[in-house]
Amino acid sequence: MAEYNLPLPSIGESISEATIIRWLKKEGDYINKEDVLLEIATDKVDSEIFSPVNGILKKKLFSPNQVVKVGMSIAILEIKNGKIIKNDKKIFLEKTKRFYSPLVRKIAYKEGISIYELDTIKGTGYYGRVTKKDILEYIYHKKKKETNQFSNWNNIENHQKSFSLYSHDYDINKKNDKILEMDRIRKITSMNMINSTRTSVHVTSFVEADITNIVKWREKTKESFQRNTGEKLTLMSFFVESVVKAIKDHPMINISVNGEYIIKKKEIHIGIATSLPNGNLIVPVIKYADSYNLFGLIKIINDLIKRARSNKLKPEETQGGTYTISNIGSFGNIFGTPIIHQPQVAIMAIGMIQKKLSIIEDSKGDFFGIRYKIYLSHSYDHRVIDGMLGGQFVKKVALYLEKFSCCTKI
């Protein structure tokens, strides 16, 4: 019998560690290759870890709730003539439509880069192929980013520890009070919110948008639309489409900041803040959102939200966003001041739809009418976005919503 040390594989770009949720096998169990050994969680999504060999689970090296760094051994398996799967689609490399040279594949495998992550690397070679230089530069910047991220998280954790020092005078024996420890996601969310408010100077602009045309058309069309397409006609798709159009008009909203440098993003990747059944929040990302028509947005939004709420998102589907939208109207809120999702520089909250008595202007004059209206709340980083740009952007989103016509093709 030989021993095989099972490492925690790379789970996605910028993810350097994971928390053990639970083991699905006991020590002494016989394991078939591709059996699920355990479940892990990151600050993005939960995942399953598969065994790449046949063997016996000899020893678990970590317990539930412990944090493990990518690449560290998490278990020891006893194997006999065991062959490691070198193209496990869950962990390593599989077939892909994009061409990769054997050298690039070898480097990716050695560094624990999955095919999903490899597909995100921009190539400078012939027809956009990933060269040796491309992947080595990617690995260098990834490790540098992980080091900086680990340093930032330590600072935040130290801040929380110092804060707890001032909380010891609280009487935990009070009969009417119940002490609840934050769960893992809540702790991570707390750290991210602290980090965002420390990093960005938040300013929020508000506008009111008349979406009567959209609401009435949706009410008239939604049943036949779902019957014919199998998809729910969501309002979020209209908001995403309008935001994408406004970003094209104001591309300096689609940026990030690195020290004293502004990084202008070429692609538009829209994050959708999604509440989960347990009350936590996750932000799936519509990659290349400007490449979809309205029907395409409806399909991908429905799919992402459904899989987010059933814990079936891939790690890379929560990464790389360049702008985020949050539908606070679903909680009955009319407007708010959302916190920026780093390293982005802006976020928009969509308020609750309200019927309002309004003055309507047309060629025949002014008259009263009932209109469906919402407030759009646009928070932005005042270090790089001034009030004029921040205000113009949210106003442009409102104008695109108001311009919707029932004749619009989807």
Image (tube, grey):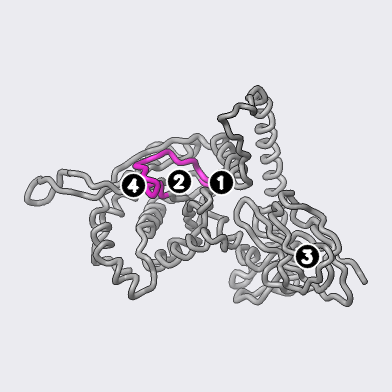
Q: Which residue is mark 4?
A: 352
Q: Residue at x 40, y 39 (%)?
A: 336
Please report whichever mark, 3 or 2, sits nearer to the chain's N-terminal start: 3
Label placed on residue 343? 1
Q: Secondary structure at mark 3?
A: helix
Quadrant of residue 168 within the rendered picture: top right
How many residues crowd mark 3 within 10 Å: few (<14), some (14–19), many (20+)? few
- In the rendered image, is residue 3 in sight? yes
Q: Residue furthest left?
A: 364
Q: Residue at x 35, y 58 (%)?
A: 235
Please report whichever mark, 2 or 4, sits nearer to the chain's N-terminal start: 2
**Relative to 186, is 303 on the left or the right?**
left
Residue type (three-letter) at the residue carrying disc 4: Met
Judge depth for marks 4 and 1 and give the one in front: 4
**Relative to 228, is 52 on the left or the right?**
right
Q: Which residues are magenta?
A: 327-344
Q: CA distance from mark 3 to mark 1?
A: 29 Å
User: Could you say where residue 277 lies in the image, as x and y percent from the top left?
Assistant: 50, 53
Residue type (three-letter) at the residue carrying disc 2: Ile
- Quadrant of the snapshot with the C terminus: bottom left
Q: Which residue is mark 2?
A: 347
User: Could you say where residue 212 lies in the image, as x and y percent from the top left?
Assistant: 23, 54
